[in-house]
Image (cartoon, coloured by chain):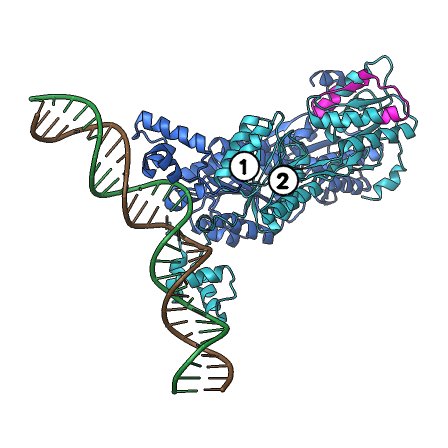
Chain colours: A cyan, B blue, C brown, D green
DNA sequence: CAAGATAATTGGAACGTTCCAATTTTGTCA
DNA sequence: TGACAAAATTGGAACGTTCCAATTATCTTG
């Protein structure tokens, strides 16, 4: 039953033409006569022919493989799932297909999957690097002329394009908003301090406070895993301070949700008794109760932009590194205390 | 700078052996002398050779491509993201790499991506079919001997393996638990009624009620999109009933979270004033407040099992369809009203 | 040391496609 | 109709690997 593959030669024989003609038909070349094309296409349908891209790709080493890779550090984080969906959209409609791999923050795994993808002939890579990724890890890739677009995180010294969100400005805007609402003890909660993203956001927090001549208290900065559970832990610690904060900016939305959970466990009502702002604007941010005030980075849009950038570089053949910082905007919802009437909000659903 | 690919022949020349020997080294054949192997490997490293699987695969059409495909109907749903992570784990450690595509419930898109993956020579496919997928859509795939494992949803009449969770038993257990807690007006909230999964779960709900001689009231079954927003909408409608329910089983966890949101908007405390049970046990279920009582299907484990099944079939060369229904268990947390002391719970984090 | 066995290496064909140069067919016009 | 141009088709080489049969080098043993 496992019939051997039907090949372009089988088609040629059945249609009474040469394999070259069939090939021309496959690439929709204008060189071939209309009636021949029709005949060949009919045979292709009849015999259930499936094009062998591997073979094609072997011959035309100049042209590319219609495969791109995307490797992310944590696919269980819905931010990255959204990002992958964005990439998938543009990649699919460009006739490409994507390898996807999850590294779970392991640089070893990352090295392996990138190597494997390379052997399979990807013509470009979108990478959200695992923590600790070194420029040297990307060296062989870029040396062989394969375009790489880093997203979310940069890797210092690597000559690749990057698309990151404006972490500094985003956090600065969040803090300014809280200050405008009258808060002056504002905590910075969550995230691992050894990452560039953390430090950019932290700097935005500090600068915003300095701008309005508020002191920066180090005890108000409490790091934790960038997860929901981490958020619970962080707010727990923050509430132990002699002088409690009255508001918090969070490393990301997951942390912010955890912070809300932790507040409720202390009978504090997020958005009423304590202001919370997240970062990312994941999809749940708008439907959560209270809806989360957050910095919108539109992960799906970011995925789309990254894919577009990558495809541009692939088509150009040249991959001159460009660093795009994607602007970001504060979306005010309920969790920061600027609540609108709840009945009104519900009617929006 | 775009140096042409270094090939097995370049290696051979540089190492002073034949290309056949280099090939042998690449496949770690025991036929080659230890010192030759070392020499060749050294050259491979020096020249930065990268193996061309496309070419290799062309020759050995018998053996397979080390690529599998996974296509899901909604990657933004964290259930599927988790599933993909599970697949990724076993697939990666088997030396495979995966194409991933999202169909967003479009059968057209699904057809396209499957065709594309086929052209790229996948040796197996894990598929969570889009709504409305017909057995005929999978026909050409299975005809060409490519193993397919359906997950989550079955497609009637297709001769492929499937791995679905025991929807009937899961929902039955959930309802029984609520009955045991003294509820007798129990709603069934969320989900699209035109899906097999919905109907299996609904049947479990009905059977559990019948088992204890409780009447099944149709107005207590309110369908909606299987999302958080859908959950809000569903509970809104349920609360309008003359005789309100006191508890709800939900189509999935996303709906359950929405139901909790909706309850809070009505100043009802989920887990205190109203019992809620979800389905899926997504990762947020344990950290949410209140922690969600739910039916655990362990999406990541399901992904792993699906991948293992697929690899087994690939290696066997035979793909006799087997239908596995994965058993499922009720995880009792806070949202169903069997709350443990909150302080105790927090200390677990 | 002859001779057979074993170990190691090798050249060429094959996989399914594309590309190129060459050839055949068709069309045009004086 | 002859001559030339344009359109359509074609055979063979090439892509980078693996496989096979054949060859050469090395070891055993009587």
Q: Which residues are magenta?
A: A208-233
Badge 2 is on which residue? B201
- The answer to whether any part of residue B210 appears in the image is no
Examine the rendered structure and indicate whether residue B281 appears above or below residue C11. Answer: above
Query: Is there a contact, CB below 8 Å, between mark 1 and mark 2?
Result: no
Q: Residue B106 in the image: x percent, y percent?
A: 62, 51
Q: Residue at x 76, y 16 (%)?
A: B343
Q: Residue A240 sits in which quadrant? A: top right
Badge 1 is on which residue? A143
Q: Chain of mark 1?
A: A
Q: Residue at x 32, y 37 (%)?
A: B18
Q: Is residue A229 magenta?
A: yes
Q: Secondary structure at mark 2?
A: helix
Q: Chain of mark 2?
A: B
- The mark lying in front, picked from 1 and 2, is 1
- The answer to whether any part of residue B243 appears in the image is yes
Label 1 Cα crowd, 10 Å radius (few <14 / some 14-19 / many 20+): few
Q: How many marks?
A: 2
Foreground: B58 or A88?
Answer: B58
Examine the rendered structure and indicate whether residue A155 appears above or below residue B67. Answer: above
Q: Secondary structure at mark 1?
A: helix
Q: Residue B260 in the image: x percent, y percent?
A: 77, 33
Question: CA–CA distance between discs 1 and 2?
Answer: 54 Å
Q: Residue D11 sits in which quadrant? A: bottom left
């Amino acid at each position: 039953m496992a019939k051997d593959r039907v090949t372009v030669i089988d088609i040629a024989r059945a249609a009474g033409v040469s394999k070259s003609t069939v090939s021309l038909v496959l690439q929709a070349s204008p060189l071939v006569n209309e009636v021949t094309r029709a005949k060949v296409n009919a045979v292709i349908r009849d015999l259930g022919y499936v094009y062998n891209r591997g073979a094609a790709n072997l011959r035309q080493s100049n042209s590319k493989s219609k495969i791109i890779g995307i490797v992310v550090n944590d696919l269980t984080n819905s931010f990255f799932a959204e990002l992958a969906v964005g990439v998938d959209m543009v990649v699919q409609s460009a006739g490409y297909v994507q390898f996807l791999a999850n590294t779970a923050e392991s640089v070893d795994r990352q090295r392996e999957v990138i190597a494997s993808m390379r052997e399979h002939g990807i013509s470009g890579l979108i990478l959200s690097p695992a923590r600790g990724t070194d420029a040297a890890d990307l060296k062989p890739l870029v040396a062989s002329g394969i375009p790489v677009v880093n997203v979310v995180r940069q890797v210092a010294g690597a000559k690749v394009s990057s698309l990151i969100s404006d972490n500094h400005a985003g956090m600065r805007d969040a803090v300014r908003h809280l200050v405008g609402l009258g808060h002056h003890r504002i905590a910075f909660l969550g995230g691992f301090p050894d990452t560039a993203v953390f430090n950019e956001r932290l700097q935005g927090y500090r600068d915003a406070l300095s701008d309005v001549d508020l002191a920066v208290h180090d005890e108000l900065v409490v790091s934790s895993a960038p997860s929901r559970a981490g958020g619970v832990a962080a707010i727990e610690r923050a509430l132990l301070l002699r002088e409690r904060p009255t508001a918090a900016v969070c490393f990301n939305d997951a942390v912010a949700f955890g912070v809300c959970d932790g507040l409720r466990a202390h009978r504090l009502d997020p958005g009423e008794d304590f202001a919370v702002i997240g970062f990312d604007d994941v999809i749940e941010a708008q439907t959560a109760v209270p809806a989360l005030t957050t910095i919108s980075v539109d992960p799906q849009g970011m995925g789309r932009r990254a894919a577009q950038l990558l495809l541009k570089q692939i088509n150009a053949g040249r991959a001159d590194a460009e660093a795009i910082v994607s602007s970001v905007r504060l979306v005010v919802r309920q969790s920061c205390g600027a609540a609108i009437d709840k009945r009104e909000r519900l009617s929006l659903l």
